[in-house]
Image (cartoon, rainbow, N blue to C red):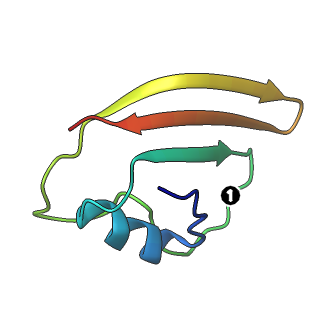
Amino acid sequence: DKYVNILGADVGRQALTQGLVDELLIFIAPVLLGDGTRLFAYPGGAKIPLERMTQSEAPLATGVWYRVVR
């Protein structure tokens, strides 16, 4: 019943795979970091269907809001 922010790819992925996430807001920026934790890299994991709700664009980033389909 509350709005909670989860920051970090690993913690976000764990919460998503446990069914604790209702919506995702992902910002895509044109930056190549070269290393780090991928949010959706989960070999052998279950597919989690997402429905795009909104998309916004700014000069340096794109924000996409998804709903987890249950």
User: Image check: 15 left or right of 12?
Assistant: left
Which residue, as the protein is rendered here, is positioned at the far right?
A: 59
Q: What residue lies at 54% left-to-right and 75% top-to-bottom?
A: 36
- What secondary structure is marked by label 1? loop
User: Image check: 46 left or right of 27?
Assistant: left
62 or 5: which is nearer to us? Answer: 5
Could you tell me residue 4's position as x and y percent? Answer: 57, 63
Could you tell me residue 66's position as x and y percent? Answer: 47, 35
Could you tell me residue 51's position as x and y percent? Answer: 37, 27
Could you tell me residue 12's position as x and y percent? Answer: 45, 67
- Quadrant of residue 6 in the image? bottom right
Which residue, given by chain and number where applicable, does mark 1 sit on?
A: 32
Q: What residue lies at 61% left-to-right and 68% top-to-bottom?
A: 34
Which residue, as the protein is rendered here, is positioned at the far front?
A: 1
34 or 29: which is nearer to us? Answer: 29
User: Image check: 15 left or right of 64?
Assistant: left
Q: Is residue 8 above or below residue 58?
A: below
Q: What residue lies at 58% left-to-right and 45% top-to-bottom?
A: 25
- Quadrant of residue 10 in the image? bottom left
Q: Quadrant of the C terminus?
A: top left
What amino acid is at disc 1?
Leu
User: Image check: 41 left or right of 25?
Assistant: left
Tell how many labels. Answer: 1
Q: Is residue 24 above or below residue 70?
A: below
Question: How many residues crowd mark 1 within 10 Å: few (<14), some (14–19), many (20+)?
Answer: few
46 or 35: which is nearer to us? Answer: 46
- Quadrant of residue 43 in the image? bottom left
Q: What residue lies at 67% left-to-right and 66% top-to-bottom?
A: 33
